Amino acid sequence: MSLSSTSSIAAVDALLVRDVDGQYRLARAEEVLSQARRVLSQRVRHGATMSSPQAVKDYLRLEIGVLDHEVFCVLFLDAQHRIIAL
């Protein structure tokens, strides 16, 4: 199935992934979330700036929102809102 034929049957906002055979298919929700967590964890490392409460909320939602139990988490920031430690 080519990309053009897949996009004609998929929703406009659907995400596609390429399988090992080089064919495109619709991405599963867990694949999308896994990649989102990977991208976000690359962005948020020592020295990254948490410039808004929404940025912190988004990070924590992706990082610990998938857990099936409650956790306590602390982000240590300096005066410029840069991450000192996670």
Image (tube, rainbow, N blue to C red):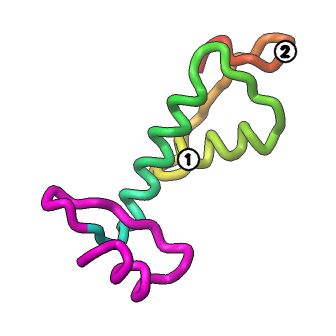
Inspect the magenta stretch and tell me whether residue 17 lies in it. yes
Q: Gap in Å between the C-alphas at discs 1 and 2?
A: 23 Å
Residue at the image point whose x is 63% and y is 40% from the top: 59
- The kind of secondary structure element at disc 1 is helix
Res 80 label: 2
Residue at the image point whose x is 41% and y is 49% from the top: 34
Res 46 label: none
Question: In front here: 12 or 63?
Answer: 12
Query: Which residue in the protein does label 1 denote?
Result: 62
Residue 20 image-quadrant placement: bottom left
Residue at the image point whose x is 65% and y is 25% from the top: 74
Above or below: residue 2 compared with residue 52: below
Structural crowding at the residue carrying mark 2, measured as other residues with C-alpha within 10 Å and reported as few (<14), some (14–19) or many (≥20):
few
Percent coordinates x, y for residue 60 in the rendering: 62, 41
In the rendered view, does 86 fall on the left or right side of 58? left
Quarter of the rendering occupied by the N terminus: bottom left
Question: In front here: 55 or 9?
Answer: 9
- The kind of secondary structure element at disc 2 is loop
In the rendered view, does 3 fall on the left or right side of 68? left
In the rendered view, does 79 fall on the left or right side of 84? right
Q: Amino acid at mark 2?
A: Gln
Percent coordinates x, y for residue 51 in the rendering: 81, 30
Residue 3 image-quadrant placement: bottom left
Above or below: residue 69 compared with residue 23: above
In the rendered view, does 6 fall on the left or right side of 46? left
Residue at the image point whose x is 74% and y is 23% from the top: 49
Query: What segment is highlighted magenta in the picture?
Result: 1-23
